[in-house]
């Protein structure tokens, strides 16, 4: 039971955090006018169940387990999207508002976590409360995290962090009550829920091992109990991943071999990715500690590191990382929170920022690793014997600047043109930035401007995979088609298909052949699509249009009925079927 002064401090801190949360929601509001970007758009477009608001157990099961899109196989965030869609309709606005509220919840959870953590270090409740409040505010208001919050699909990152933080709190309670089954149950449930949100929560045992290593022995069991906990956590770090792999039908050896094998879908090897990540991690840290709006961007692009000396910043970056780890380890007894902040950051980057062949960099990968980065600074400020105003005034000014930067990021996310123009400006080597900016101009009925942007991408982009180049040339073909330059359009689309048989390119190539009055080539394109994506949303629709072009109404009707069987909400197919029903039955039929 909290004493009255301690309770008053906690209530005051909670009120301040709620005020800060309201300020974040207000600063974020401009982001709600934007659209879905990148994986958010692909994810929500790929799940047909999100196109209508009903909710059932079969729909939940099919969305999670029968959807080919990997992000849909994370049950808790996917369930949240289904519920959101059922209640208010899933839109960029609703998605960003809910993400912002989850982020605000995480700020409050982090306060209570840091407060309990600092009491385990033997600090007074007053210092623990002040330092925890400062840490939660410095982390939560940091505009570097705005891109993670506004990227709707990364609700998985936010929720994974929620359960991860709750798991750490539960673990700290088990140190105080070793035989309290409720806290052990809460820890287990948080661990499972975290993994069900995103796989990086599997690092929770390793995070707890780092935490236990730096914490002093508890008052109940002392050093022997601490050694036992360290041994158990080390066992969990080694055993839990193996058990999880076997539960999913994989052997640990298969997983290790798969991780070590270079991917044919990437332009970098495992070694090149690991070397480049040194520079990426140092850049992350610089953005977290100096999140000026001019430095922040959603799309991050880095030239590859081919060796430790090419470029030389690779050696400098890895040397800096080693130096941070060594110096903090040498000073662990004197500055345990500094050691925790540094090791926590790098430990929680192990899955996404080492040699595993994911995309090279994303800002959302820093959301969980950065939670303790500001704790040493907050703790130092809380222990100062200076007048409160000398600390309070600069802190408030910094918070206001953070909120202004947050508002600036929201304005970028709320304007698709500004979003991709900034991406091109700040990451000029990124092909995806040019592709999406060109698409925006094409949507605005400015295909000539779009072609200009695409051409800049051809000239400036580097280290891109086959799919990215396929997407660029496909969109160049679409823009050429809008310019009624059908010859170049066909050339670009065929060039795209040489890089990768993209379903969208095949669909647009079929549309081009319809304009060229060549239904036979439409059918050939759709046959190729059927081999790669038999359940594509427009496969049967395009076949129906090809049949109509040669007067085969019955065949067109059959294709449209197949389309509507697979995708009942396809309005275009329904309208075309209604048009066929109104056609004169005496229409002649031919063959494609």
Image (spheres, rainbow, N blue to C red):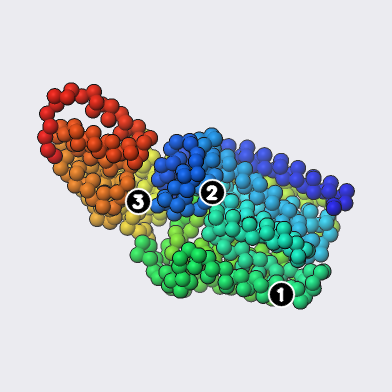
Which residue does the numbered mark 3 point to in the structure image? 457
Q: Give the side of residue 474 with respect to residue 42, left or right.
A: left
Find residue 215 and report its horizontal and vertical position in percent.
74, 68
Q: Quadrant of residue 368?
A: bottom right
Mark 2 is surrounded, within 10 Å at the Cα level, by few (under 14), some (14 to 19) or many (20 or more) other residues, namely: many
Please report contact status of discs 2 and 3: CB closer than 8 Å, yes or no. Answer: no
Q: Earlier in the sequence, mark 1 or mark 2?
A: 2
249, 113: nearer the viewer? 249
The label shown at residue 248 is none
Q: Give the side of residue 379 with respect to residue 451, left or right.
A: right
The label shown at residue 77 is 2
Find residue 205 and report its horizontal and vertical position in percent.
62, 66
Which residue does the numbered mark 1 point to in the structure image? 228
Please report contact status of discs 3 and 1: CB closer than 8 Å, yes or no. Answer: no
- Residue at image position (85%, 52%) is 2
Question: Relative to 440, does residue 277 appear above or below in the rendering?
Answer: below
158, 568: nearer the viewer? 568
Q: CA distance from mark 3 to mark 1?
A: 57 Å
């Amino acid at each position: 039971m909290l004493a009255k002064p301690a309770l008053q401090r906690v209530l005051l801190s909670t009120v301040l955090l709620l005020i800060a949360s309201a300020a974040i929601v207000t600063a974020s509001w401009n982001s709600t006018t934007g659209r879905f970007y990148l994986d958010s758009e692909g994810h929500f477009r790929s799940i047909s169940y999100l196109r209508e608001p009903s909710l059932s157990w079969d729909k939940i099961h099919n969305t999670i387990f029968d959807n080919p899109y990997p992000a849909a196989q994370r049950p808790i965030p996917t369930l949240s999207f289904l519920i959101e869609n059922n209640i208010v309709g899933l839109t960029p606005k609703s998605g960003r508002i809910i993400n912002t509220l989850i982020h605000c919840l995480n700020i409050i959870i982090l306060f209570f976590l840091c407060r309990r953590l600092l009491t385990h270090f033997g600090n007074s409740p007053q210092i623990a409360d002040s330092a925890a409040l400062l840490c939660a505010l410095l982390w939560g208001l940091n505009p570097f995290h705005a891109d993670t919050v506004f990227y709707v699909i990364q609700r998985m990152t936010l929720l994974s962090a929620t359960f991860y933080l709750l798991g750490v709190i539960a673990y700290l309670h088990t140190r105080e009550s070793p035989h309290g089954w409720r806290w052990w149950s809460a820890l287990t449930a948080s661990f499972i829920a975290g993994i069900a949100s995103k796989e990086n929560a599997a690092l929770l045992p390793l995070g707890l091992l780092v935490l236990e290593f730096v914490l002093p022995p508890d008052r109940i069991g002392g050093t022997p109990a601490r050694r036992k906990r360290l041994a158990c956590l080390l066992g969990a770090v080694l055993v839990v991943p193996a058990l999880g792999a076997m539960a999913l039908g994989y052997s640990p050896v298969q997983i290790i071999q798969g991780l070590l094998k270079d991917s044919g879908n990437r332009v970098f090897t495992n070694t090149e990715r690991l070397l480049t990540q040194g520079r990426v991690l140092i850049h992350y840290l610089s953005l977290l500690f100096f999140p000026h709006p001019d430095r922040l961007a959603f799309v991050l692009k880095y030239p590859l590191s081919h060796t430790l000396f090419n470029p030389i910043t690779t050696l400098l970056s890895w040397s800096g990382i080693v130096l941070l780890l060594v110096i903090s380890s040498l000073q662990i007894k004197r500055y345990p929170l500094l050691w925790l902040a540094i090791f926590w950051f790098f430990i929680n980057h192990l899955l996404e920022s080492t040699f595993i062949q994911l995309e090279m960099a994303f800002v959302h990968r820093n959301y969980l690793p950065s939670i303790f980065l500001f704790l040493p600074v907050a703790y130092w400020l809380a222990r100062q014997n200076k007048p409160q105003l000398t600390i309070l005034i600069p802190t408030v000014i910094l918070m206001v600047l953070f909120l202004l930067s947050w508002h600036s990021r929201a304005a970028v996310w709320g304007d698709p043109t500004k979003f991709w123009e900034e991406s091109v400006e700040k990451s000029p080597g990124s092909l995806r930035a040019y592709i999406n900016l060109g698409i925006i101009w094409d949507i605005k009925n400015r295909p000539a401007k779009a072609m200009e942007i695409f051409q800049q991408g051809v000239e400036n982009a580097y280290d891109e995979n086959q799919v990215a180049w396929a997407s660029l040339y496909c969109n160049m073909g679409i823009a050429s088609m809008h310019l009624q330059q059908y010859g170049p359009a066909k050339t670009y689309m065929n060039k795209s298909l040489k890089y990768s048989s993209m379903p969208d390119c095949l669909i647009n190539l079929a549309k081009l052949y319809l304009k060229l009055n060549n239904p036979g080539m439409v059918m050939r394109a759709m046959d190729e699509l059927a081999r790669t994506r038999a359940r594509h949303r427009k496969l049967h629709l395009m076949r129906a249009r090809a049949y109509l072009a040669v007067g085969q109404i019955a065949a067109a009707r059959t294709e449209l009925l197949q389309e509507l069987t697979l995708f009942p909400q396809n309005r275009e197919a329904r309208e075309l079927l209604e048009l066929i029903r109104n056609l004169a039955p005496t229409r002649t039929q031919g063959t494609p």
